[in-house]
Image (cartoon, grey):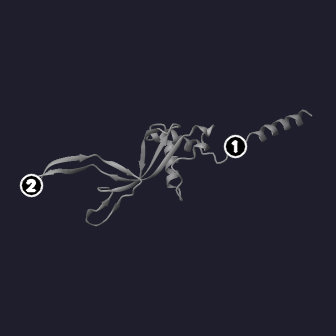
Amino acid sequence: MKRLISAVAVAASLAAWTPPANAASEAECSIWLCLPGGFPLGCAAAFSAFISRVTHIPPKPPLPAWGSCAVDSGDGMGASDGIAAFVPEQRICTKTTGKNDRCIAWETIPAHYVKGSPCTRGKDNYSNPPGCTATFMYVDVFDADGNQIGDTYYWK
C-alpha cells in the first residue's frame, strides 16, 4: 500500500510539472542580457547562440521571444531588429573659393548607420544613402518602459 501511495504521489507531482512550450535555451535567453553590452566577458555562450540564430537557414530572429525566457512575461521587455546602411567617416567641403572652386573649408561627418535602409551602390560612385559602403543587420533591446538598454548591436 505504501508503494502505491508513493507511486501516486510521484505521478501526481510529475503530472503537475510541465516544461514551458517553446522555451529558449539558457544561452539564448542570455542574449537578452549580453547583447546590449556588446557581448562582454562571460557572454561567450550567449554570443554563440546569437550567431547560431542569425546564421540559421532560414534565419531566426536575433533574440528569442521574451516570453520563452521570462518566468512572468508580463514585464514588456522588447527588441527591434532590421537592416542598416553603414556610412564611414567622411570629409566634405563646406566652402569654396569663387575663382576655381577650390575647397577652403571642410567638415568631418562621423561614421554612422542609417537604420531601415540597405546600402545600394551604382555607377559613378553613386550610393544610397549617400556615402554608404555596406549593409549590416542590427538589433536594439528595450526595457519595460520602452527605453533602449545599451547600444545598438550591429553585425554583418
Q: Residue, x 90% and y 32% (percent of image)?
A: 2
Front residue of 56/69: it is 69
Residue pictured at 77% horizontal, 39% vertical: 16
Q: Find residue 36 and name its label.
A: none
Quick one: label 1 or label 2, which is nearer the N terminus?
1
Q: Secondary structure at mark 1?
A: loop
Where is residue 101 shown, x and y percent of the image? 11, 56
> Is 86 positioned to the left or the right of 32 in the image?
left
Q: Is 123 located above or below residue 92 in the figure?
A: below
**x%, y% of residue 37?**
44, 38
Quarter of the image that includes the N terminus? top right
Q: List the residue tagged with mark 2.
A: 98
So how many labels did they put on this image? 2
Q: Residue extending furthest top?
A: 2
Q: Which type of secondary structure does the marked residue at label 2 adopt?
A: loop
- Seen at 7% across and 56% down, the residue is 99
Residue type, numbered disc 1: Pro
